[in-house]
Amino acid sequence: MAETTFTIDELPIPFTSGQTILEAAKAAGIYIPHLCYHPEFQAHGGCKMCTVMVNGKPQTACTHKAAAEQEVEVDTPELNSMRRTLVQMMFIEGNHFCPGCEKSGDCQLQALAYEYEMLSPHFVEFYPHRDIDASHPDVMIEFNRCVLCELCVRASRDVDHKEVFAIAGRGQNAKLIINSPTGKLGDSALAVTDRAAHVCPVGAIIVKRVGFAASPIGERKYDRGSISAEVETRETSEAL
Amino acid sequence: MTTGGQDKVKVRLATTSLAGCFGCHMSFLDIDERLFELAELAEFDRSPLTDIKHCGPCDIALIEGGVCNTDNVHVVRELRANAKILVAVGACAINGGLPALRNRLPVDDILTRVYRDPNTGEPCVPNSPELPLPLDMVYPVNEIVRVDYSLPGCPPSGDAVWKFLTDLILGRMPRLEYSLLNYD
């Protein structure tokens, strides 16, 4: 059977019509880094981690459709260096203190930093002043760790049908806001069983009374292996 | 920096701990019996291990902890002026770490709340000229002086310290494999 293919780093990759580059790559077992993409939700193209070169032009692989004869570059020193810079910028934009974060070891931002061998955030720290919202009985928001991936926004809107979260403001002033009369999570419709309470890739939305008990150091998700090695299995199991 | 030959010239190594917990130095000691091997390659300048107070010209300076007061600023500048290679070691030296959690609070608020006269309850902030003044924030080392390398971890494991140091001493580009690269 003749298959339609495009190439990733000169390897022929089959795809079906309508598939994005990221989906086709995943199906072929090729890792394209991503943070705001999640197979359950509509692609967003926000974090730019999945940027690849398509016929020499940068495109987000989670939104760009695969097409025959496309030449896609994924794993190049230039792109990987850009990805490390993106991660560094996300680190300095918030307050990401891994040693004190219960998500450490299971955090996708941290895992991407490991993947691209980030040894320091390089840029001058913003040290933003953001308050914690612990008003909800079961779920807490640590805004200092939010990377604005909008996964909670999409999960709450498309799966929970509650629209608890939104992003307000633009550029440097963009922030996660909560849809409730007081703006507090405790007064919103969020329940701990909601998809939105469990989709955060970083340590921003965390379920209370779990803390560091989930898995000990050495046995956490990214202690066991890198994000590029685990990505296929993790997302299929999480989607179930 | 030479490591071979008959009259071995040893690498001169300085270390210091600023706004940190000394955990990185403990991890440094965690290289265990490799300390003997290190002693063949290196000798210490200013370090808590030698109690030398001021650093002279040296090859490598390891800095643990963020920069939280005026004394820390003097120390990092002295190390930078004397060291060929300056390494920020551990989370606090790299991004301020947990001490930097105070960065959102005005420093006078913290001091007047913490230091109170036990009898009257009035603020009595220690003001001895011997005490270095706290800075407005805790800064990563690279925001005060140029840093050549960073060795992340809280603390970096003994194995990571050993890999990094030996890479540097032997003139290789320091590189941590996946299992040695941790931020916590």
Image (tube, rainbow, N blue to C red):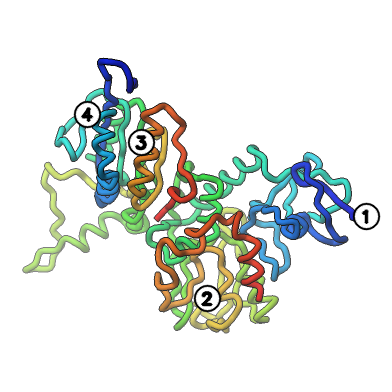
Marks 1,3: beta carbons within 8 A: no
Element marked by disc 2? loop
Question: Crowding at label 2, few (<14), some or many (≥20) Cα neighbours within 10 Å?
Answer: few
The answer to whether dots 3 and 2 both sit on one chain is no
Tag 2 residue:
A183
The answer to whether dots 2 and 4 both sit on one chain is no
Q: Which mark is residue B55?
A: 4
Tag 1 residue:
A2
Residue B153: horizontal and vertical position, in percent? 38, 50
- Residue in the picture at 50% in, 77% down: A184
Tag 3 residue:
B165
Give, as a three-letter code, the residue at label 3. Leu
Mark 1 or 2, nearer chain start: 1
- Residue in the picture at 53% in, 55% down: A111
Give the number of the mark in front: 3 or 4.
3
Quick check: B54 above or below B135? above
Residue A131: horizontal and vertical position, in percent? 43, 66
